[in-house]
Image: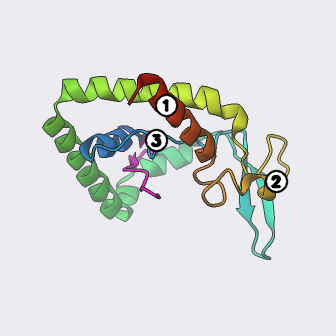
Amino acid sequence: MAIPLGVHVVSPGGEVHTSGDHAYQYRYTLPPKPILYSSSKASGGYVDFDMRDGRNKCIKVPKSFISDPVRKFLDSPVWTAMNYGDIMLYAAAERSLNLTIDMIGRERFGKALETFRALKREAEEVCAPHITLPCSVEGILQQEKAKDNCFYKDMGCGNPCFNKFMANKTQSIGA
């Protein structure tokens, strides 16, 4: 069953707040399995890129860098005005997330979030060697190998391993 991966709150500065995933899981009493995920776009890795001519090519993901002129522009009132709608949307999502966490209880939520993060770290450790992305670590396209490992292109990669991990975890705790 396909379940949305929750709320990824991305700040105007580009930080991803994954506690939204856990709030979504907690609020709707979902098991962790539909929420566990792995990053497919890590700095220094490769990503499957759709070329304009219909071909696909593996492109290296550059290390994050913001030059001084770009930083100056991002800190300017011009950028703020151009992105005001997105900034308001981010503020609303952040407020909603905070209200949800307040409703659950910050201490209770914090403990549950740490448990979830530990489970996610363990799942990533176990599953990392078994995740096949559309691009190899050498930058070679391997879409056919990744087809059964990802939901779509490079999204949801590792789901077979995460499913097996959670099934084993559930059995071991007798749930």
Region of the chain picked out in magenta, as a range: 1-16
Q: Position of residue 104 (x, y in %)?
A: 17, 36
Prevailing SS of the magenta stretch: loop
Q: Classify residue 96 as left or right of residue 134.
A: left
Distance from the alpha carbon under mark 2 to that under mark 3: 26 Å
Which label sits in the foreground, 2 or 3? 3
Asked if disc 3 and disc 1 are in contact, CB closer than 8 Å, the reply is no
Disc 1 secondary structure class: helix
Residue 93 in magenta?
no
Amino acid type, callout 3: Lys
Q: Distance between the Cα atoms at labels 3 and 1?
A: 10 Å
Mark 2 surroundings within 10 Å by alpha-carbon count, few (fewer than 14), some (14 through 19), many (20 or more)? some
Q: Which residue bears the numbered disc 1?
A: 120
Residue drawn at the location 51% of the way across and 36% of the way down:
167
Residue lying at 69% horizontally and 44% vertically, measured from the top left: 62
Return the residue found at the far bottom: 53
Q: Secondary structure at mark 2?
A: loop
The disc placed on residue 33 is 3
Residue at 76% over, 69% down: 51
User: Residue tagged by mark 2?
Assistant: 142
Give amino acid for label 1. Answer: Lys
Based on the displayed image, in which of its 4 quarters is residue 89 positioned? Answer: bottom left
Q: Which mark is residue 28?
A: none
Compared across the picture, whether 154 is left or right of 119 comes to right
Q: Judge by depth and name the residue closer to the eye, 77 or 29.
A: 29
Picture residue at 17% right of the left edge, 43% below the top: 99
